[in-house]
Image (spheres, grey):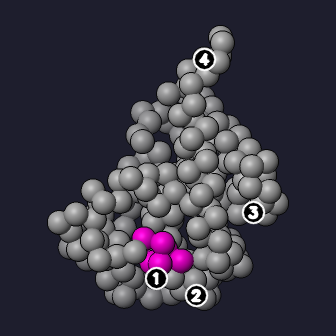
Amino acid sequence: MQFESDASGSSGKLLERFFTGLSEYAFYSQLGVTDTELVSYVSNLLIRFTKTDALHRIRQLNGRRATEVVTMMAEAQHRVGIAKREVHRHIGDFTLFWTGLYPESLRGLQTDKSDHFVSYCFEGKKAYEIASEIEADDDQTASSELLHRLSEQFEMCAYGLREIRRQWEEKPSGDEPILF
């Protein structure tokens, strides 16, 4: 899912409203989740990951992008403090994104790579939990409590993302415009 728009431009604002609306509908109305901070985080995750650079933002020591969970886990071991927290948070985000939105793609992501032994759900939950235990600055985008809830509710969040995908893939009825 790659969109060719400036996230700060008018198409970026439309995309933000689209994902926010879908997230709120899926989590509040369909799943009965009332955790506004968690729903907002998932919505922002979708918005951030519309850019491939954000999806593969972790770099190895040699400068190459870490595109596999196993490689990201190894990179986390080379970092300390906030940097380590951010890599673990990204592992949680990355695994939640793929597990929730594109579970059918996991076999392709894991074939003939080191990730074929990795359970995305298990590693995502573990990564969020580790990130939640690392001391953070007050201005961090995700509180330790939120990261802990993401760990505990990983499967429910993945299910919510599947519902979001189902909603955006539904064909509009009547004269409604087609978004994608």
SS for tag 3?
Answer: helix
Q: Name the residue beneath numbered marker 3.
A: 37
Query: Callout 2: few (<14), some (14-19), or many (20+) C-alpha neighbours within 10 Å?
Result: some
Q: Is residue 119 above or below residue 56?
A: below
Residue 164 in picture, x, y percent from top left: 60, 45
Main SS of the magenta part reads helix
Front position in the image: 19 or 159: 159
Q: Earlier in the sequence, mark 2 or mark 4?
A: 2
- Image quadrant containing the N terminus: top left
Query: What numbered label is drawn on residue 84?
Result: 1
Tag 2 near tag 1, CB within 8 Å: yes
Query: Callout 4: few (<14), some (14-19), or many (20+) C-alpha neighbours within 10 Å?
Result: few
- Residue drawn where x is 71% and y is 40% of the image: 21
Query: What numbered label is drawn on residue 177?
Result: 4
The span picked out in magenta is: 120-125
Q: CA distance from mark 2 to mark 1?
A: 8 Å
Q: Which mark is nearer the camera, 3 or 2?
A: 3
Amino acid, disc 4: Pro
Query: Callout 3: few (<14), some (14-19), or many (20+) C-alpha neighbours within 10 Å?
Result: few
Amino acid, disc 2: Ile
Q: Name the residue beneath numbered marker 2.
A: 134
Q: Earlier in the sequence, mark 1 or mark 3?
A: 3
Amino acid, disc 1: Lys
Q: CA distance from mark 2 to mark 4?
A: 45 Å
Q: Is residue 51 above or below residue 81?
A: above
Q: CA distance from mark 1 to mark 4?
A: 43 Å
SS for tag 1?
Answer: helix
Residue 22 in picture, x, y percent from top left: 67, 42
* Quarter of the figure with residue 69: bottom left
- Residue drawn where x is 48% and y is 72% of the image: 121
